[in-house]
């Protein structure tokens, strides 16, 4: 595989390989855990997880991006679009303070967030590429569209992207287009999985790698993106560790020990389940972060 790999955020060729995966092995895991193989059109080759030393973005090479049909299939799982997320509550806090007259949600899914904010602004619009999810949102009476960002012919006081950035092949281009749809002084809110949270203890998380996620965003990378797109970062927050997050973290750490017998791993997992409430109460919030983190950025008024 070529050493000249370009970062999708800053175009730097300076990157370090953190880990390699065999696509054929990932395909087997998808088939076993998700019920289908999303790599049918992908060559059986190595997938590299790389860290850009310039901007701090972690990205995968080669780029393997899920299409609209991939997301339509995933969204048949009832849990794929949660009714509520930590970032929804945080965004509503910002809306109550900022009081935007218009809000655009990019990647609105089935419209769970839109449903909560329809009365908070005069104009609320959601866009997505998942036709199945949009049909569900339309049945709720929500204002949604499959337009690309460039096709939207209006400006907004606030643009939000929740768990969208990590799916994109060209994240900087999309955010630049989103910023173009902001009024001067408008606010952009980005929420993505937090690589410094419990996910760093999970060896292989199928939904946090291609073809589902193509990038992994640290705080440094998020702030770099905001600056490059003409934004001033005004806030940063991390999701607290939830009960389920701790269970996934501990199970993953048990599974990663290749030397341990299966029966011992099984007994350890039983012990974790029995003791989880106590372990959760004893965890240190400073050292244990949840699934997501987010930045709030403002469009610079020239």
Image (cartoon, helix red, strand yellow):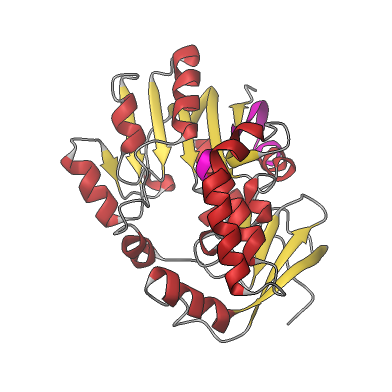
Q: Nearer the viewer, residue 193 or 138?
A: 193
- In the shown orientation, is residue 68 left or right of residue 29? left
Q: Is residue 112 visible?
A: yes
* Residue at 47% in and 78% down: 39
Q: Is residue 176 visible?
A: no
Check the image and report above or below for 27 versus 199. Answer: below
Q: Nearer the viewer, residue 92 or 267?
A: 267
- In the shown orientation, is residue 18 left or right of residue 21? right
* Residue at 68% in and 54% down: 201
- In the shown orientation, is residue 78 left or right of residue 210? left
Check the image and report above or below for 42 versus 5. Answer: below
Q: Which residues are magenta?
A: 226-244
Q: Is residue 277 magenta?
A: no
Q: Quadrant location of the N terminus? A: bottom right
x then y, percent, for residue 256: 67, 66
x then y, percent, for residue 111: 31, 39
């Amino acid at each position: 595989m070529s050493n000249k790999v370009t970062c999708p955020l800053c175009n730097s060729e300076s990157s370090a390989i953190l880990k390699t995966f065999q696509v054929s092995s990932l395909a087997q895991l998808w088939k076993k855990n998700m019920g289908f193989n999303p790599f049918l059109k992908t060559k059986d080759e190595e997938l590299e997880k790389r860290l850009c030393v310039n901007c701090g973005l972690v990205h995968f090479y080669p780029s393997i991006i899920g299409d609209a049909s991939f997301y339509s299939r995933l969204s048949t799982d009832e849990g794929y679009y949660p009714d509520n997320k930590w970032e929804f509550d945080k965004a509503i806090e910002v809306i109550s303070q900022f009081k935007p007259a218009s809000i655009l949600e990019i990647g609105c899914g089935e419209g769970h967030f839109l449903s909560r904010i329809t009365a908070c602004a005069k104009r609320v619009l959601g866009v997505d590429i998942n036709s199945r999810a949009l049909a569900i949102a339309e049945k709720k009476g929500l204002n949604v569209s499959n337009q690309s960002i460039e096709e939207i012919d209006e400006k907004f006081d606030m643009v939000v992207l929740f768990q969208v950035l990590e799916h994109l092949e060209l994240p900087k281009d999309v955010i630049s287009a989103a910023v173009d749809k902001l009024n001067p002084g408008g606010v952009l809110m980005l929420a993505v999985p937090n690589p410094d949270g419990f996910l760093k203890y999970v060896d292989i998380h199928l939904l946090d790698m291609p073809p589902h996620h193509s990038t992994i965003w640290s705080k440094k990378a998020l702030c770099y993106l905001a600056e490059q797109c003409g934004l001033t970062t005004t806030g940063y927050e991390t999701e607290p560790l939830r009960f389920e997050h701790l269970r996934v973290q501990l199970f993953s750490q048990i599974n990663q020990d290749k030397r341990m017998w299966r029966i011992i791993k099984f007994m350890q997992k039983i012990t974790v389940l029995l003791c989880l409430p106590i372990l959760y109460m004893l965890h240190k919030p400073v050292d244990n972060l949840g699934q997501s983190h987010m930045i709030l950025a403002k469009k610079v008024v020239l």
